[in-house]
């Protein structure tokens, strides 16, 4: 089985900010993860990444945010997308 693109979405927001979501189903987990997905979710504001989730080889599932790079527990793609969208909405609303 080859990697299969599940989602590729890039949205430019009216204020110039950008949201990009890319998710692949992969034939084998990306070490050290144990799930079958490779993903990159990013929110760029003012020309810089202010929020990101990915599972880079060797690092596992992790988040880039105001507190730097921190690991998180991957549950599912649906949960990850929901978490990401809620965080972007909070950031954009100033919470």
Image (cartoon, grey):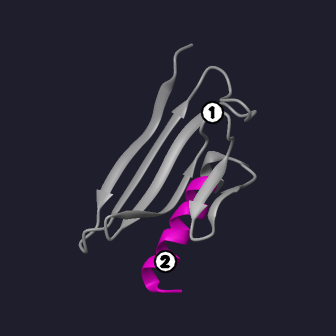
Q: Is residue 3 above or below residue 38?
A: above
- The mark lying in front, picked from 2 and 1, is 1
Please give the name of the residue rendered at 70% of the width and 30% of the height, measured from the top-left corner. 31
- Which of the labelled discs sits on residue 91, or is there none? 2
Local secondary structure at mark 1: loop
Image coords of residue 95 (percent x, y): 53, 86
Please give the name of the residue rendered at 31% of the width and 57% of the height, measured from the top-left corner. 11
- Viewer-proximal residue among 6 and 12: 12
Which quadrant would the N terminus be assigned to in this image? top right
Membership of 18 in magenta stretch: no
Q: Describe residue 46's horizontal placement relative to residue 5 as left or right.
A: left
Using the rendered view, name the quadrant where residue 12 is placed.
Answer: bottom left
Q: Is residue 90 above or below residue 85?
A: below
Would you call the spot at circle 2 few (<14 residues within 10 Å), some (14-19), or many (20 or more)? some
Q: Is residue 15 above or below residue 37?
A: below
Using the rendered view, name the quadrant where residue 59 is placed.
Answer: top right
Q: Magenta stretch?
A: 80-95
Question: Between disc 2 and disc 1, whose residue precedes?
Answer: 1
Would you call the spot at circle 1 few (<14 residues within 10 Å), some (14-19), or many (20 or more)? few
Q: Describe residue 94's horizontal placement relative to residue 36 as left or right.
A: left
Image coords of residue 88 (percent x, y): 48, 70
- Viewer-proximal residue among 20 and 70: 70
Please give the name of the residue rendered at 25% of the width and 69% of the height, measured from the top-left corner. 16
Membership of 91 in magenta stretch: yes
Task: Give the residue at mark 1.
Answer: 57
Image coords of residue 30 (percent x, y): 65, 29
Local secondary structure at mark 2: helix
Please give the name of the residue rendered at 72% of the width and 55% of the height, measured from the top-left corner. 72
Give the main secondary structure, helix, strand or loop, of the magenta stretch. Answer: helix
- Viewer-proximal residue among 69 and 26: 69
């Amino acid at each position: 089985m080859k990697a299969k693109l599940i989602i590729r979405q890039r949205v430019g927001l009216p204020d110039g900010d950008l949201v990009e979501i890319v998710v692949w189903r992969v034939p084998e987990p990306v070490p050290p993860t144990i799930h079958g997905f490779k993903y990159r979710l990013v929110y760029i504001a003012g020309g810089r990444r202010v929020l990101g989730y990915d599972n880079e080889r060797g690092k596992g599932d992790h988040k880039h945010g105001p507190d730097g790079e921190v690991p998180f527990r991957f549950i599912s793609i649906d949960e990850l997308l929901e978490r990401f969208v809620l965080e972007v909405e909070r950031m954009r609303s100033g919470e």
